[in-house]
Image: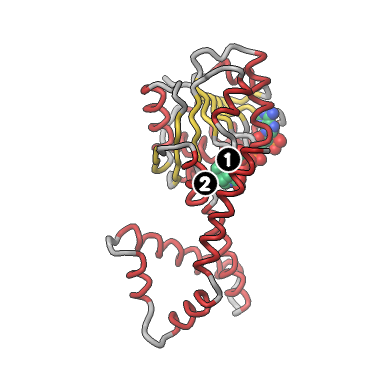
């Protein structure tokens, strides 16, 4: 059975671990490493996975090493691993934004198989999206197993180039936050109208869920679904005119370009 070591017990690794365990992946084959105890112990307790303060101990346990620390720590963590234990036959999977395969291999001081994965936090609930790109050293079995792992927490898309990771970061990796911001703004306005915080949240979340379900359950273009809500001269048209005249569409594309640009800058830092 494949054994997984998660380096870092933070938001993203936590979401993947929860998703995997919820889908029936044996927690006995998962270890999570984090130097500080609170998040690691909470995750270990919540998902019944093994835990350790030592990255080296976690690496020794596993075939796949999932690097889930902040991008600026990836090089240091990889260098520490490769100087303190054998990494032969281990496949490294990095979820870090703006951290290239070349940089990871350099830090590992070895042309190790490295797969970059750009997941998102809805993986926790099985609704994730992951973009994947593999280094030349990754074999078919490692590709297949990584596909299966990430497919168990959502949909996956193998990318044709490493640059595609920066693009999918803008499209899905960072994107839950765009929808959260939109929902936060709506919730705050609903509160202003006099709904309680709880009522406002329920109204907004159900509307977002309903809209997403309509997109999922219809073949028609999303623009058609929008038009179906929009009566000529009605309330929706008034609202959409405000959004469009305020530059929402341009703002969204600019925001996505900013995410791509930031990923590219991070790779140079
Ligand atoms: N959050 C997201 O939606 C997404 C994040 N990512 C990527 O995932 C990675 C992690 O992000 P995120 O989960 O948000 O960040 P978090 O800060 O939530 O998690 C990072 C974790 O790494 C731990 N850590 C710090 N130093 C070490 C170390 N030397 N060895 C092992 N663990 C260590 C931290 O512990 P402590 O807090 O105790 O310092 C923390 O628990 C990033 O590279 C990011 O680009 C990718 C896609 C989506
Ligand atoms: O904000 C970030 O840099 C990470 C990558 C995608 C989501 N969170």
For the point 59% across and 35% down, the residue is 99
The quarter of the rendered structure image containing the C terminus is: top right
Q: Is residue 112 above or below residue 124?
A: above
Q: Nearer the viewer, residue 131 or 262?
A: 262
Q: Is residue 171 above or below residue 267?
A: below
Asked if marks 2 and 1 touch (Cβ < 8 Å), the reply is yes
Mark drawn on residue 169 = 2
- Answer left or right for 3 relative to 264: left
Q: Quadrant of residue 207?
A: bottom left
Residue 143, percent from left and from top: 40, 27
For the point 59% across and 54% down, the residue is 258
Label 2 residue near ligand 2, CB within 8 Å: yes
Q: Which residue is mark 1?
A: 97
Query: Which residue in the rendered view is the most extreme toward the right?
Result: 36
Query: Mark 2: few, some, or many residues within 10 Å (few <14, many ≥20)?
Result: many
Query: Which residue in the rendered view is the most extreme toward the left?
Result: 219
For the point 27% across and 60% down, the residue is 219
Q: Is residue 34 visible?
A: no
Q: Nearer the viewer, residue 264 or 198?
A: 264
Residue 230, percent from left and from top: 38, 79
Residue 206, percent from left and from top: 46, 64
Label 1 residue near ligand 1, CB within 8 Å: yes
Label 2 to label 1: alpha-carbon separation = 7 Å
Q: Is residue 196 visible?
A: yes
Residue 130, percent from left and from top: 45, 41
Q: Earlier in the sequence, mark 2 or mark 1?
A: 1
Q: How is the image coloured?
A: secondary structure
SS at mark 2 in the image:
helix
């Amino acid at each position: 059975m494949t054994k997984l070591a998660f380096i870092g017990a933070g938001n993203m690794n936590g979401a993947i671990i929860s998703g995997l365990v919820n889908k029936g992946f044996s927690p006995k084959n998962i270890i999570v490493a984090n130097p500080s105890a609170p998040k690691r112990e909470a995750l270990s307790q919540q998902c019944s996975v093994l835990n350790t303060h030592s990255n080296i101990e976690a690496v020794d346990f596993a075939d796949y090493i999932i690097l889930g620390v902040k991008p600026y720590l990836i090089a240091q963590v990889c260098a520490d691993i490769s100087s303190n234990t054998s990494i032969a036959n281990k496949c490294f999977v990095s979820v870090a934004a703006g951290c290239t395969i070349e940089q990871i291999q350099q830090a590992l001081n070895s042309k190790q198989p490295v797969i970059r994965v750009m997941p998102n936090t809805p993986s926790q609930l099985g609704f994730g999206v992951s973009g994947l790109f593999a280094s030349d050293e990754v074999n078919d079995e490692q590709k297949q197993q990584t596909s299966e792992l990430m497919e168990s927490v959502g949909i996956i898309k193998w990318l044709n180039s490493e640059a595609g990771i920066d693009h999918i970061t803008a499209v899905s990796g960072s994107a839950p936050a765009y929808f959260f911001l939109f929902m936060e703004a709506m919730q705050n306005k609903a509160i202003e109208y006099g709904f309680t915080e709880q009522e406002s949240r329920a109204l907004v979340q159900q509307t977002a869920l309903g809209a997403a379900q309509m997109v999922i359950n219809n073949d028609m273009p999303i623009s058609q679904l929008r038009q179906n809500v929009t009566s000529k001269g009605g309330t929706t048209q008034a609202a959409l005119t405000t959004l469009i005249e305020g530059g929402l569409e341009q703002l969204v594309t600019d925001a996505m370009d900013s995410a791509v640009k930031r990923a590219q800058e991070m790779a140079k830092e």
